[in-house]
Image (cartoon, rainbow, N blue to C red):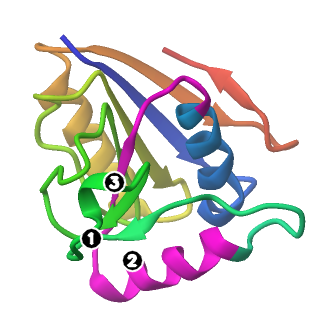
Amino acid sequence: MAEVLFYHLEARPLEAVLPLLLEKTLERGWRAVVEVGSTERAEALDAHLWTYRDDSFLAHGLAGHDTDAHQPVLISSGSDNANGANVRFFVDRAVPQSAEGYERIVYMFSGHDPDAVAEARLAWVALKAENTLTYWQQTDAGGWERKG
């Protein structure tokens, strides 16, 4: 049974939150795959993770290269797990259908997009029978409050 965390973004955008959650994932000794909705978005996140902080970067790669298996974080628009990740992030309208094969699923969706909220509700129903689910809503200050 996997742990599935729903992150409802409201105050801070994905670009501000995702790098911090990926850093925490790596601190646990886990590998991660970040699944996005399009190749264009994967490329944009790739560029962002190299420059999001002046004093550091987050080691990662775009899926589809010979080095995929060696990447601590892999950004993909597909459903593969080429780096043997323990954690799979779903962002930018990529929606989890299953948690099979992962210790943790992190599903991040925008509270400003009614379609994304509706997809999150459907994903909650689909995943709750087989997994442990928690729901985190972003506070006005950008922190997280557990709601379920």
Q: Is residue 49 magenta?
A: yes
Q: Residue at x 39, y 44 (%)?
A: 32
Nearer to us in this view, 64 or 22: 64
Q: Amino acid at mark 2?
A: Ala
- The magenta span reads 27-50
- Other residues around mark 3 within 10 Å, as few (<14) / some (14–19) / many (≥20): some
Disc on the earlier residue, 2 or 1: 2
Drawn side of residue 36 relative to residue 136, left or right: left
> Residue beneath label 2, please?
42
> Residue beneath label 3, please?
70
Q: Position of residue 15 (x, y in %)?
A: 64, 65
Q: Measure the alpha-carbon separation of dots 3 and 2.
A: 18 Å
42 in relation to 92, above or below: below
Q: Position of residue 18 (x, y in %)?
A: 59, 53
Nearer to us in this view, 83 or 102: 83
Q: Secondary structure at mark 3?
A: helix
Q: Residue at x 43, y 53 (%)?
A: 73
Q: Position of residue 50 (x, y in %)?
A: 65, 73
27 in relation to 111, above or below: above
Q: Is residue 81 magenta?
A: no
In front of the other: label 2 or label 1? 1
Residue 63, disc: 1
Q: Amino acid at mark 3?
A: His
Image quadrant holding the N terminus, namely top left
Q: Measure the alpha-carbon separation of dots 2 and 1.
A: 9 Å
